[in-house]
Image (spheres, rainbow, N blue to C red):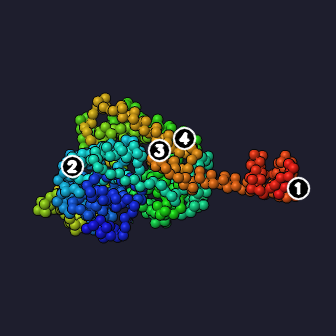
């Protein structure tokens, strides 16, 4: 099939958007390719279409599990075979999926980068007939990017697995420096291509305001803009507080943060997406991968940590290309806070060692043990237990991640899953020997198909209803059968995951790269000062953001707060000029006057403006002079 046929058949689209075709062609020519496209630009098509046009499987690396799951579901809905592998899945489960990728008809394997740290996984990929490596969120490979993720550094090893398979790196945000870093870290081969779509958002009006009373201003935005909106705040507590205050004003609003249960998060997100609750107050955990076109405004009530993050979050407004607003409200205290965070983001070696030590104790690991173990990880609980500061601890964890002691992943909801390991005969013998298990096993087999072949999502509550056992009893019995190796059972989770990549060390033997710690601080400082410059400088906002992304020739947008203020003052200026001219002409119609007699009679403008208008009128022949006196 040609790429146009693929696009039509699977996606139902008639034409490619700008750059999509060029990017796809470059990949089909076998070139390593870097695609820089703003969110909503249509990046997925760039790897999905060429992968469908060719034989073999496309391996997609993505750090965002929710996004991965979404894309897999979307592909499946089109009748395309796709699977995803990420943290929190058991070893056996992963094994089966990888096998399917080698021997089955699977077209897309989505995998999170830390999974590639495992030599076993890499070995399996070597045996796949890979047609393309797609690296999503490719800026994560650069420590100059705002979202550096150490496991990304290992992606270059994909090249060793299949030296002639092209790599397509995609990102919605990258400065020139990051772009260069991406192509070098991924060891792009000679002849590679870079495509950059402008990050300009012509329909988005950026507004920055230094406000003491942010809430009052927020109300004004909500009342005047109408439609759907997102309000970003810095922490979970604030989401609730701001939502409560808005509700008191009779505004339909919900709040959202990662601490809510998975069900609750899904419900709130769906209600917002459908327009049932048009407004949501959220932490930055909200919005990634949500494709809602008609968001009319995004308000930030706090300063973001970087312009990259700001551009992403603000950019969720106005995807439908209709007029929308990105409003950033701040005051001096926020600038102070941002500078303070800078310090918080820079843990000392001692503090890093301390966090590492606490981690080992938290999970009760013996020294020399723990390699490969994965745990649910609740950062808030961990910090509370050892009285640690959250921001600093998070930074320390990131540094430990970079040193490959641990790997972190975001929270993700996984239902309970189960696969039967025993053969039918062994299982049957067990049922006879243990009659109390007979009902549960029969119900399992009756309710779910394919249990002998693969992991199947199950619901303990359903099993409980059908067996008259309590949910707790169901769980305990499944665990017991797991102990007996009759089945493999993974209980549901929606927690972030922490994996120990190496055995626990004594804290004093923990080696940390000092150079890296210093560089990290410098990068963070650079990002923070760019944010402060953005809010304080007097310039077109769109132009400032674009120039941060190295688009240097952008024009004034004409719709940001700066451009609007400029237009207003120009209008005011024009008005003033016409008032002065009118007055001069009116006076000089009635009497002839010397210049020094005329000026004191004028009511409008400054003397300089009056003299200027006088000269303009004279040059235009609208006033004339005779014997030092002027008349009109
Ligand atoms: P990104 O990953 O760049 O944010 P997506 O790949 O999610 O963007 O695409 C954004 C939206 O645009 C999706 O709904 C997608 O189906 C749609 N889209 C992408 N390419 C095209 C196209 N050529 N024609 C019409 N719609 C497209």
Q: Of circles 4 and 1, which is in front?
A: 1
- Front-most of residues 195 and 531: 195
Question: What's the distance in space between the residues labelled 4 and 1, CA to CA?
Answer: 59 Å
Q: Of circles 2 and 3, which is in front?
A: 2
Residue at which label 3 appears:
305
Q: Position of residue 599 (x, y in %)?
A: 82, 48
Query: Which circle's residue, 4 or 3, is located before the other in the chain?
Result: 3
Query: Disc 2, disc 4: CB below 8 Å?
Result: no
Mark 1 closeness class: few <14, some 14–19, many ≥20 residues within 10 Å? few
132 on left or right of 594 = left
What residue is drawn where x is 84% and y is 55%? 631
Quarter containing the C terminus? bottom right
Q: Position of residue 273 (x, y in %)?
A: 45, 63
Residue at which label 4 appears:
335
> For residue 163, which numbered disc appears in the image?
2
Question: What's the distance in space between the residues labelled 1 and 3, CA to CA?
Answer: 65 Å
Give the structural element (helix, strand or loop) at label 2: loop
Q: Is residue 285 visible?
A: yes
> For residue 591, which numbered disc appears in the image?
1
Vertical order, 21 against 506 (above or below)? below
Q: Is residue 496 visible?
A: no
Query: Disc 4, disc 1: CB below 8 Å?
Result: no
Mark 3 closeness class: few <14, some 14–19, many ≥20 residues within 10 Å? many
Give the structural element (helix, strand or loop) at label 4: helix
Give the structural element (helix, strand or loop) at label 3: loop
Question: What's the distance in space between the residues labelled 2 and 3, CA to CA?
Answer: 38 Å
Give the structural element (helix, strand or loop) at label 1: loop
Q: Position of residue 440 (x, y in %)?
A: 23, 63
- Front-most of residues 30 and 420: 30
Query: Disc 1, disc 2: CB below 8 Å?
Result: no
Query: Which circle's residue, 2 or 4, is located before the other in the chain?
Result: 2
Q: Position of residue 3 (x, y in %)?
A: 29, 65
């Amino acid at each position: 099939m040609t790429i146009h046929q693929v696009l039509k058949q699977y996606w139902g689209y008639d034409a490619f958007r700008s750059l999509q075709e060029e990017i796809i062609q470059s990949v089909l020519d076998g070139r390593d390719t870097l695609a820089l496209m703003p969110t909503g630009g249509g990046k997925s098509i760039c790897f999905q279409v060429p992968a469908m046009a060719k034989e073999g499987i496309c391996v997609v690396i993505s750090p965002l599990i929710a996004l991965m799951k979404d894309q897999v579901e979307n592909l499946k809905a089109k009748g395309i075979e796709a699977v995803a592998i990420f943290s929190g899945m058991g070893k056996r489960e992963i094994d089966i999926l990888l096998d399917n990728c080698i021997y089955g008809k699977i077209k897309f394997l989505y995998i999170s980068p830390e999974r590639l740290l495992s030599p076993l996984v890499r070995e399996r990929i070597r045996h796949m007939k890979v047609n393309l490596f797609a690296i999503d969120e490719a800026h994560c490979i650069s420590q100059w990017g705002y979202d550096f993720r150490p496991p990304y550094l290992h992606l270059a090893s994909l090249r060793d697995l299949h030296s002639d398979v092209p790599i397509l790196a995609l990102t919605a945000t990258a400065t020139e420096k990051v772009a260069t870093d991406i192509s070098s870290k991924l060891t792009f081969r000679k002849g590679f291509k870079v495509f950059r779509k402008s990050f300009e958002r012509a329909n988005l009006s950026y507004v920055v305001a230094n406000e003491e009373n942010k809430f009052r201003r927020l109300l004004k935005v909500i009342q005047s803009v109408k439609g759907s909106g997102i309000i970003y705040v810095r922490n979970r507590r604030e989401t609730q507080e701001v939502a409560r205050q808005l509700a008191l004003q009779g505004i339909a609003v919900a709040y959202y943060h990662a601490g809510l249960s998975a069900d609750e998060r899904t419900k709130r997100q769906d209600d917002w997406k459908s327009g049932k609750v048009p407004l949501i107050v959220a932490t930055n955990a909200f919005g990634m991968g949500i494709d809602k076109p008609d968001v009319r405004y995004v308000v930030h009530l706090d300063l973001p940590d970087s312009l990259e993050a700001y551009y992403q979050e603000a950019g969720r407004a106005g995807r439908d290309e209709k007029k929308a607003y990105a409003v950033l409200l701040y005051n001096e205290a926020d600038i102070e806070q941002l500078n303070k965070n800078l310090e918080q983001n820079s843990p000392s070696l001692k503090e890093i060692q301390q966090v590492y030590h606490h981690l080992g104790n938290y999970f009760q690991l013996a020294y020399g043990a723990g390699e490969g173990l994965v745990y649910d990880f609740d950062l808030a609980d961990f910090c509370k237990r050892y009285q640690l500061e959250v921001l600093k601890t998070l930074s320390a964890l990131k540094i430990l991640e970079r040193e490959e002691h641990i790997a972190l992943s975001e929270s993700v909801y996984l239902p309970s899953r189960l696969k039967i390991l025993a053969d039918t005969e062994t299982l049957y013998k067990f049922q006879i020997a243990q009659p109390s298990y007979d009902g549960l096993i029969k119900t399992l087999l009756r309710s779910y198909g394919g249990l002998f072949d693969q992991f199947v999502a199950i619901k303990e509550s359903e099993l409980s209803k059908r067996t008259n056992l309590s949910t707790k009893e169901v769980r305990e019995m499944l665990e017991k059968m797991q102990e007996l190796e009759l089945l493999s059972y993974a209980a549901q989770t929606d927690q972030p995951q922490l994996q120990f990549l190496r055995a626990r060390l004594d804290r004093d033997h923990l080696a940390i790269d000092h150079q890296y710690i210093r560089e990290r601080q410098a990068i963070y400082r650079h990002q923070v000062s760019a944010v402060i410059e953005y809010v304080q400088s007097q310039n077109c906002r769109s132009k400032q953001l674009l120039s941060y992304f190295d688009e240097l020739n952008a024009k004034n947008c004409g719709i940001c707060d700066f451009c609007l203020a400029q237009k207003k003052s120009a209008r005011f200026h024009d008005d003033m000029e016409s008032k002065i001219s009118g007055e001069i002409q009116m006076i000089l119609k009635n009497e002839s006057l010397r210049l020094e007699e005329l000026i004191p009679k004028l009511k409008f403008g400054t003397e300089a403006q009056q003299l200027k208008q006088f000269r303009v009128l004279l040059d235009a022949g609208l006033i004339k002079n005779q014997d030092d006196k002027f008349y009109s």
